Amino acid sequence: MGKILDYINSVFGPKTTVHTKYGVLNLARQQDRTKARRLIAELMQTTDALTRRDIASWRQAWQLAINAEEPNRRFLLDIYRDVDADAHVSGCIGQRKGFVKAKSFKLTQPNGTADKEAVKYFDTIWFKQLMDYILDARYWGHSLIQLGDVVTLPNGVLGFDGVELINRKHVIPEHHVVVRCQGDSWRTGIDYHEEPWNDYLIEAGDPHDLGLYLKAALHTIPKKNDLAFWDTFAEMFGMPMRVAKTISRDENDIRKIERMMDTMGAEGYAVLPEGTEVDIKESSRTDSYNVYDKRVDRANSELSKLLIGQTMTIDDGSSLSQSQTHLSVFENLVEQDADNLRDIVNNQLLPKMIMHGFPLQGLIFDWDESTDYTPEQQVAYETMILNNFEVDQQYFIDKYNMPVGERRTQGLVGNDESDSSSKSSNSKSTKPFFD
């Protein structure tokens, strides 16, 4: 079938017996096959370490990723995972991706005629998931997506049974290679541009692009550390400390007092011999928290500028004119993402769908801008057209699914009122001033 993930997972090949440190396994037996799959999982899967990231590790990971001889993005992707977990980053990306996915699309013939039946092939779960993976490439740098098997969907049309993102740690896009184990040299990998692997693969992002998360990490790393320091500050100065003094030197008495203090609450405590003093020096400023709060605000504003080009569509704005300017900047980014997604569908997805038997020959994927008006805009648009041009009644029958008769010959109500009012005013104005 040419599925690259199936090949990666087939570690043992066609052999029926294998020698491992656990003994000889006969793959013809169900019990040994189950044990073999467990060994494969131990071999192939690694746990991502949730360690504290700092700027030094970020620089080192960046250097490894751009190594000309052996590019390795593994450690940089670990940092990206921390970036992706940031709440503000998630909000910005969700807003940007949401605007793209909310756009209506159509499939047209070369002459521009829309094919409404063909839309059913894309109005599916697998295509929405594919759009997510493609849009994510802007932030992660690259996405290699494997299409599932061709099946008949519940709506009666052909479709894929799903899409799967190939683990980025196994992909070396600079050499268009997938390696079996993380950290392997690209020279030992599979060239996914070659057949039959490329029949089921969609590639998004530039092979040498490291994504926006590379720059975002410069702000999420100090932000995360700053929040940890703020928590420490709150623990030390936000809650009072309880001090128990005793003159007893009996270890049992001291342990008993410690247990009592520990169960009294979450505040810090100390058990000290008589005469011992604990002096905690707190800042004399009453707004010490601003040191942390302002740093977090600064990090969030920089992340907003990086990911959505401005701040006012996700944070508070100061004026209507400024918000409109910021919205225009944001819409430009959305259009860039939409154009990139459209190009990938037309240049990669559609040819592969046709190759797998989908009846989509000659069709072009495009965004349907005409249906993205608000209800108020749509009414104003149709009113303007009706007042100036003759419109085929079939348009309203198809769009609103309602019977439409012959058009009325009389003018609009608004025009009648204006005419009558003008006549009335004219009659009043012609009345003699003097009787």
Image: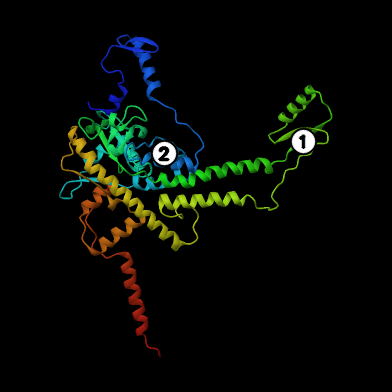
Q: Secondary structure at mark 2?
A: helix
Residue marked by disc 2: 76
**Drawn side of residue 290 relative to residue 192, left or right:** right
Q: Nearer the viewer, residue 79 or 333?
A: 79
Residue 269 location (% of width, % of height)? 73, 34
Residue 32 location (% of width, % of height)? 35, 11
Residue furthest to the front in view is 69
Residue 226 location (% of width, % of height)? 56, 45
The structure residue drawn at horizontal position 35% and vertical position 73%, both measured from the top left corner, is 421
User: Can you tell which mark lies on residue 243?
Assistant: 1
Say if 333 sits above or below 352 in the image: below
Res. 170 image quadrant: top left
Residue furthest to the right in view is 247
Whether residue 157 can be seen here: no
Q: Nearer the viewer, residue 250 or 384?
A: 250
The structure residue drawn at horizontal position 63% and vertical position 49%, both measured from the top left corner, is 289
The structure residue drawn at horizontal position 48% and vertical position 62%, both measured from the top left corner, is 319
Q: Which comes before the other along the chain, label 2 or label 1?
A: 2
Query: How packed is label 2: few (under 14 Cα within 10 Å), some, or many (20 or more)?
Result: many
The structure residue drawn at horizontal position 30% and vertical position 39%, both measured from the top left corner, is 174
Q: Label 1 is placed on what type of residue?
A: Val
Query: How packed is label 1: few (under 14 Cα within 10 Å), some, or many (20 or more)?
Result: some
Residue furthest to the bottom in view is 434
Q: Nearer the viewer, mark 2 or mark 1?
A: 2
Look at the image and name its color scheme. Answer: rainbow
The quadrant the C terminus occupies is bottom left
Q: Label 2 is placed on what type of residue?
A: Leu
Res. 232 image quadrant: top right
